[in-house]
Amino acid sequence: MKIHNLMEDIVLDKVHEIFDDDEEGMKNKGYCCCYQCRLDVACFVLNRIQPRYMTSSRGLAHLRTEYQTNLQKTADLVAMINDGIKTVSATKRPHYSHSGSEKSPVPEGPLYNFPTVMGRLLNGNTFEPMKDIDVYLQMNGETVEMIDPSWQNPYRMIDKTAGTYLFWPHPVPANSPRMSRVFEFELEIDENGYEELHHFFELDLRAETTFNDSFHMQRTYKLEDLYLFPK
Ligand SMILES: [Zn+2]
């Protein structure tokens, strides 16, 4: 059984509607209309309203009607979205490409969906969380493509992330949904003043029929703590 916050659907629909209705006008006002910025606006709103959880999508039709017929609710939502648009455009994320209003095309199955890959990086001498370090996730000597542009590779470790890095590789096509395959990854850090770090690990995956782009903490692969030693 899947738990779902129905407000996600309501808010995302409305955000896209507002952007699509007057994309030229929005751009003239200096607002970015790219897909990532739209998602950021939706997040801004969703973090400020009451979630409505349901275990199925059956409640959605009902909730949609509620929003279509209740003008006050719609007006409140639109006002909050406009706040979000201003806030997001004032804090444009530097690592987004800010191009394209469409979600990147969903790959057709069957494919191997990767879990998120998470771990901690500590200073080998002091056991303190590392910061201001780039962590690379590689496969066959190449930097692994992430699921969407909001995920970074290399992952820049900063103060706020307290020594934790997180990757989410883009799915890889499979020949058949019944196949399984072992993927060999390498985590690499080559930073001035530290010993190079190469950590190898494998993920044994079974192909799936559809693209999985919803984030689940239980689909996280946790690596052991790694230590970086100053030279
Ligand atoms: Zn943008």
Image (spheres, grey):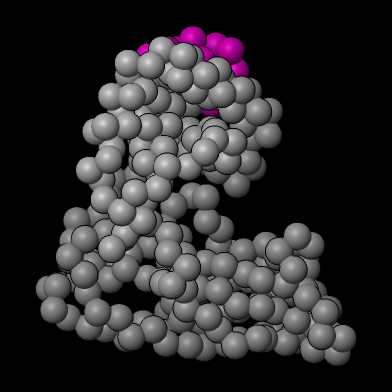
Residue at horizontal 60%, vertical 88%? 224
Give above or below for 38 relative to 154. above
Please give left or right for residue 121 compared with residue 75 in the image. right
Residue at horizontal 56%, vertical 58%? 152
Q: Position of residue 203 (x, y in %)?
A: 39, 84
Q: Is residue 36 visible?
A: no
Tell whether position 194 is magenta. no
Seen from the viewer's position, the closer of residues 155 and 61 is 61
Give above or below for 3 relative to 173. above
Tell whether position 21 is magenta. yes
Q: Quadrant of the C terminus?
A: bottom right
Q: Over which residues does the magenta segment extend? A: 20-32
Give above or below for 190 relative to 59. below
Q: Is residue 222 visible?
A: yes
Query: Does the magenta stretch mainly form a helix, a strand or a loop?
Result: helix
Q: Position of residue 213 (x, y in %)?
A: 35, 56
Quadrant for residue 179, please give it: bottom left
Please give left or right for residue 196 compared with residue 141 in the image. right
Q: Position of residue 91 (x, y in %)?
A: 68, 34
Seen from the viewer's position, the closer of residues 177 and 64 is 64
Residue at horizontal 42%, vertical 87%? 202
Q: Quadrant of the N terminus?
A: bottom left
Residue at horizontal 75%, vertical 60%? 160
Quadrant for residue 120, please give it: bottom right
Give above or below for 193 relative to 71. below
Q: Position of residue 39 (x, y in %)?
A: 48, 38
Please give left or right for residue 123 compared with residue 181 in the image. right
